[in-house]
Amino acid sequence: MNTPKNKPKYMISFSLNFSNSGQNTTAPLNCYGRKPLPIMKENITRLLRPALENPALVQSFSGVRVNFGPGPDISPADSALATAYGYVYSMLILAGFSKANLLIGHDPRPTGGAIAESLARGFLAGAKRAGCKIKIFDLGVITTPLLQTAVRELKVPGGVMVTASHNPLTDNGFKFLTGFSANSDDAPPGALLSSAKMAKLVQAVQEIATDGESEFSADIEAIDEAVFTHAFGHGEDHHHRIKAERAYLDFIGEEWGVEPHCLKPLTLGPALLDPNGGAACGINARVLEHFGVRTIETNARLGYPEHPIDTDGIDPRTGKHVLLRVAQSAYHAGARFGIAFDYDADRGNIVLAGMDESAIIPPQVVAAFSIGLALAHWKSLKKKNGRLAVVMSDSTSGASVEMAELFGAKISVVETGEINVVTRMRQLRDEGYEVPIGVEGANGGAIFGRSTCRDGLQTALCAALADESPEMPKHWVSLFPHKQPTPTHVSSVRLPDMLALVPHYYNSVFKIEGPALPHGKVKARMEKYFVKKIWPNLSKIYSSYEFANYEGALRVDRRTGDETGGWRINLQAPSFGAKSERRSIESDFIFARGSRTEAGIWRIIVDSPDETRAAELSRIAPMIFREASTGKGVVSG
């Protein structure tokens, strides 16, 4: 990575030790402080089949996830699953290499070590089959953004992050990364594998199980303990982890135009950080303080979450929103704002300091807010050259569209999925655009600048800069001459004042269950039902409609791959258009997407800046799905 001239690199003096010194045991412990997994003598293919038949198994473009149990050990079947995926992944990415390095990192879930070992064994067997000699760098407990930075900094062909992100502690999984390889595609190094590459892995693992491939079993059995230990069994690789940490600091500094504070006073914040026992413990606070943000950490005991890991929901113990306790903690600590990270720290949910749920910022608002902050910061750095673009997923509210348009940015919509956003951002840069941010509105996640994944830490840094810097509020306020914040002087504008200027949209989400039908069939029925039964009445409110489908980084008339993916009805009202006070182009929408893992489950989103229209769409959207999924009311012909 290139470093700015005269800018030193600084190391985060933070490491993790997972040795179980003092534990009474008659068997030697491995680098994770647990008994090593035995070499599989039983036919591994027979073990793999029940793992793939588990109805709770999730295999998608985002990775693989299932309930691995409380740990630290995992079942032989689950070990076979991870080994098989490691095997096919290494064969895919190492073709043509004679020598290479791969990375493994994980969040603090108890089963992380066992899964990492199984993946590593698969890596070794697959590399041997590909004719490549490999070394595996174990980076230990690490955040996903830091691991993805490590892939770019160390220029390795690939790596894997063992995590289940915001899912329960007994769930775990793994996400494979794109590296520096001739076998790479549109996804930039450090990003998740593209959906096409991930589909190849899923298919290859299925073929091993169905064909009873003896070659796979023989390759795994050939990896004895001596070979395994030489390549992987030396514990956390501190040398390469430190290189990754230094690169991460340099990357953040370059992206945001901020210098290390070192011994200078911390001038930003304070910000309350809640890593909730996850991978962000300690390290995110140190990075923010490195750049001048005062931090207050709570729930920072590694591996011990104090509340549900998924922060965008209700805490069953209190009956209140999980983020309420974060907002209240920020209020009592005198913090400017609070942020709660998920377990691998790729998402950060911002809250204002407050005592009630009005301090909680909904995900769609967070997405629009992040766009405004990122573009205002881009303007404040005097980056006026070049065309400006923002990428957003197909479930993102019109509030984000409106915010991007206020800054004059081109808007590119892609299918839901982090890798689709990241890939499109890269494509637009290749076309000559500046792309400061991409968002997934439904979860509020943001990919900033040249990052290759969502990063909760950058969300926190962006908020801290906006709260204190006079330049960002200046650009922000100038866009809303008819809607000034309460303070009369820009210098006194703070985060809550800027948040109040975010365009207001009524956005509702429904989770609906219907018959387990092919997604394409349901969509075709919904379109037919809408045209025949709904549009005659809805045309009294709207002037036109269009159906929109998204596949990967493109909008398509009909999907060429599988039938899953986002589907929308875009609706334009007669009063919208050039004379609109809000925007030159504006439309409401109904969005539908069937679950890839839960048969018959669909998520419906309606979005409008008008409360009356939003209420009408909320009434008819579930009806469209129910009538279409059951076949009732659909006119034939």
Image: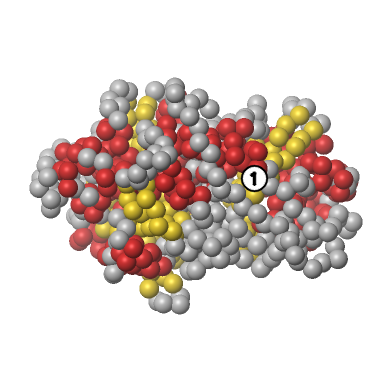
- Name the residue tied to disc 1: 139
Where is residue 355? Give x, y as percent.
29, 69
Residue at 41% x, 24% y: name it: 431
Left or right placement of residue 219 versus residue 313 in this view: right
Residue closest to the eye, 273 or 384: 273
**Residue 621 found in image quarter:** bottom left
Position of 440 relative to 356 (above/below): above
* Position in image of residue 386 (x %, y %): 32, 23
Q: Dot 1 surroundings within 10 Å: few (below 14), some, or many (20 or more)?
A: many
Q: Residue at x 41, y 41 (%)?
A: 263
Q: In this view, does 520 lie to the left or right of 465?
A: right
Residue in the picture at 64% in, 49% down: 140
Identify residue type, mark 1.
Answer: Leu
When the figure is inspected, residue 316 is found, relative to residue 430, above or below; the finding is below
User: Horizontal and vertical percent for residue 313?
Assistant: 42, 66
Residue 526: in sight, yes or no? Answer: no
In which image quadrant can residue 315 be found?
Answer: bottom left
Q: In this view, does 606 lie to the left or right of 490?
A: right
Residue 86 shows in this picture? yes
Q: How many marks?
A: 1
Q: Does 600 sit above or below residue 436? A: below
Q: Residue at x 54, y 58 (%)?
A: 278
Front residue of 46/229: it is 229
Q: Where is residue 239 in the image (x, y as percent from the top left)?
A: 65, 38
- Residue most extreme to the front: 263
Q: Is mark 1 on a helix, strand or loop?
A: strand
